[in-house]
Amino acid sequence: MRKQLKVAISLACLMMFIGCSASPVSQQTTKITFLNSKSEIKTQLEEVAKQYNQEHPEVSLEIITAPEGTSAYQKLMSMYGSGSPATMSMLDPGDTQTFLDKAVDLSKEKWVADTIENGLDAVKKNDAVLGFPFAVEGYGLIYNKKVLDKATGGSFDPSSVNSRSSLNSLMAKIQKSGVAPVMLSPMDWSLGSHLLALAYSVQPGGFPEFVKGMQNNSIDMSQNNVMSGWVQTLDLLKDNNINKHAPLDSTYEDGSKALGEGKVGLWFMGNWAWNGIKSNDTANEEYGFLPLPLNDNTDDPNNSKITVGVTKYVFIDSTATTPQQQEEAKKFLNWLVYEKSGQELLVNKANVIPAFKNIDLVPSDPLSKSIKSYMSSGKTLPFMATLPPDHGAITGASIQSYISGKIDKAELLRQIRIYWKAQQG
């Protein structure tokens, strides 16, 4: 009897041990969080997380989207302040710089070799790759093909614009057809961060040397061929602008409306404008990008390129996350790049242009397709995405003064140089 009791007790203890040890294993999941700074794809990213969690039951991925009226940068700063940052955070390239010392080194990840050219420049530090390129965007002159077909008397060929003269000729034809040639939107971020940045990206000695030359006065801005050419191209846009008599009165929404309704043939803007254009287009017209040439040299390859680059990076926190969380975050990023379900959700659901050469999928909208075409043919200029935070506002205000006739070319170039001199020290 005592022997049987001992056996029963031993079995009971054994079962309790198995139960106790098995229970946590079956319930154990690694929670990782993702801070989203693209509020327009909040729902789509939540679908991505749902799908990923279904495929990976050992992980619980949660999407945190910055609240309306709050930037993801501000949100993340408060999260770090409370000691609970997101496992992964998606930020603009400039904002990412603040957190690179808190980021996990991703240099050994497979996708590093598959990233598009210059796609990692903004997140490299001391040979370490500290961020994942999440989204590619591009800008140039968006064209309404129906308007241009009518103006040119045939099927418009985008490759026909490869100099300022050829752009000027096209604008004259659009004007003659009874349509305003172009919309030059006056927002400071568009004029400063995008239009002016185009001149930075093609400086022959490179942008850092150009800035150094402006700061130490070794560069005479009026004698810099790229800057002089840029002002001439700006003049072409200014003189052909649908709102040239009130250049500061139009809004961002006015641009998408004018192009979508065929009231202008061209609009200087980026692919983020597609939803606005689409909502104003009742005839399902075709659209694409043209380069904005800065000189008359048809042999200059830069005159056939549009600006394309990574505008969102994801970094993995190294300060408050466990090694297991870091590993699971890496697996998620690899899933987006290499697994079919991840690729499809990223491109087809979230409508993101991927920054990886191995992904053949292209978002369905025509502007993304146009950008992908320029990328495939190697006709892209670098996106100056890490300019100082106040660059757009200050230089954009100077360009606003110029296009409204308040200052001349010499003063515009002087103000741009003064801005960069103020960045010293």
Image (cartoon, helix red, strand yellow):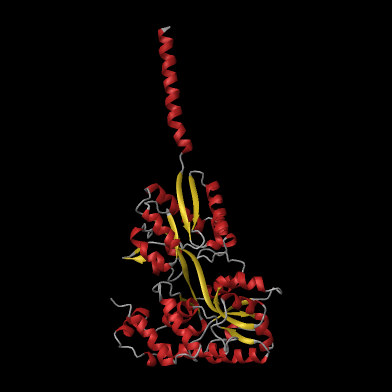
Quadrant of the frame with the N terminus: top left
Note whether 366 is above or below 247 in the view shown.
Answer: above
The total number of labels drawn is: 0
Residue 297 appears left or right of 370: left
Task: Return the residue nearer the eye: 5 or 90.
Answer: 90
Residue 224 appears left or right of 343: left
Residue 82 appears left or right of 356: left
Residue drawn at (54%, 77%) of the image: 269
Quadrant of the frame with the C terminus: bottom left
Q: Where does residue 306 sit, x and y in percent of width and height?
A: 51, 78
Task: Return the residue nearer the eye: 249 or 7.
Answer: 249
Instruction: Mark yes or no: residue 317 visible.
Output: no
Note whether 139 is above or below 85 in the view shown.
Answer: below
Q: Where does residue 400 sit, x and y in percent of width and height?
A: 48, 84
Residue drawn at (51%, 65%) of the image: 354
Instruction: Please identify the quarter of the rendering in which residue 43 is found.
Output: bottom right
